Image (spheres, coloured by chain):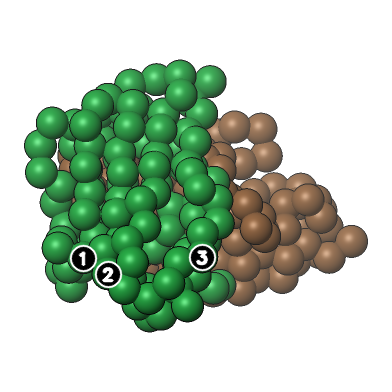
Chain colours: A brown, B green
Amino acid sequence: GENVEQHPSTLSVQEGDSAVIKCTYSDSASNYFPWYKQELGKRPQLIIDIRSNVGEKKDQRIAVTLNKTAKHFSLHITETQPEDSAVYFCAASGNNDMRFGAGTRLTVKP
Amino acid sequence: GAVVSQHPSRVICKSGTSVKIECRSLDFQATTMFWYRQFPKQSLMLMATSNEGSKATYEQGVEKDKFLINHASLTLSTLTVTSAHPEDSSFYICSARLGAGKAFFGQGTRLTVV
């Protein structure tokens, strides 16, 4: 089955800096890659996603890149703000599953 | 749009009893629903994938007779934890998939077995 690895497990940045979280996946059949943000005590919220036929997608301060050949994808957050502090999960999905990475705890220091 | 409601949010049950958790997509039809278990400060571990009108697909190591999943309609999936034991205490959370892509989470259920 699919195996998703995510790095780093924790990330601390200064407000205004950029943050990058990286994931790799194992199943070449995976074709959809979402990213979720989970704040303490809340449900994961979808923040951005990308399909395997696209190399990059951007939404304001958030962008995701996908290298299908290398089976890795990354989340980029620019101009970080304290409210970006949360746990971020990547996921890889085929037709009938959606598996998550271990998560990255992002702390943005004011 | 894309609201997923999960109930109950918290439940305490006695060891040996069964507990049912409901996951509803309120404003869309979900052909697929996923059930996860999340331990404190850890990731979302996929337990099973539920497709409307067919049997659920369970992940390796997940006992299908203990965690009964029913996906009776395009808006409702249920997870029943049978003969619950303290080690089943956890946070269970569902997600409902919109088409072939986006999946949205319910608020989760904190199960405590005493």
Residue type, label 2:
Ser
From the top left corner, tell me how far across and down residue B15 is, in percent: 37, 76
Q: Judge if badges 2 and 1 mark residues of a common chain.
A: yes
Number of the front mark, 2 or 1: 2
Does the CB distance between marks 2 and 1 fall below 8 Å? yes
Q: Are marks 3 and 2 on the same chain?
A: yes
Residue name at image x 17 percent, y 68 percent: B63
Q: Identify the residue at image location x=14%, y=63%.
A: B65
Look at mark 2 in the image and give the residue it sits on.
Answer: B83
Q: Which residue is mark 3?
A: B12
Marks 2/1: CA distance?
Answer: 7 Å
| B92 to the left or right of A87 | left
Can residue B75 be seen in this snapshot?
A: yes
**CA gap, disc 3 and disc 2:** 13 Å
Residue wearing tag 1: B66
Does residue A9 sit above or below A21 in this rendering?
A: below
Chain hosting mark 1: B
Answer with mark 2 or mark 1, whichever residue precedes in sequence: 1
Identify which residue, B88 or A104, lies in the foreground.
B88
Q: Quadrant of residue B22?
A: top left
> Would you identify the image quadrant in which residue A24 lies?
bottom left
Which amino acid type is marked by label 3?
Ile
**Callout 1: SS:** loop
Using residue B35 as the reference point, say whether residue A75 is left or right of it: right
Q: Earlier in the sequence, mark 3 or mark 1?
A: 3
Q: Do we see residue A3 in this rendering?
A: no
Report if the CB atoms under discs 3 and 1 are less than 8 Å apart: no
**Distance from Cα at disc 3 to Cα at disc 1:** 17 Å
**Vertical comparison of A83 with B31: above or below:** below
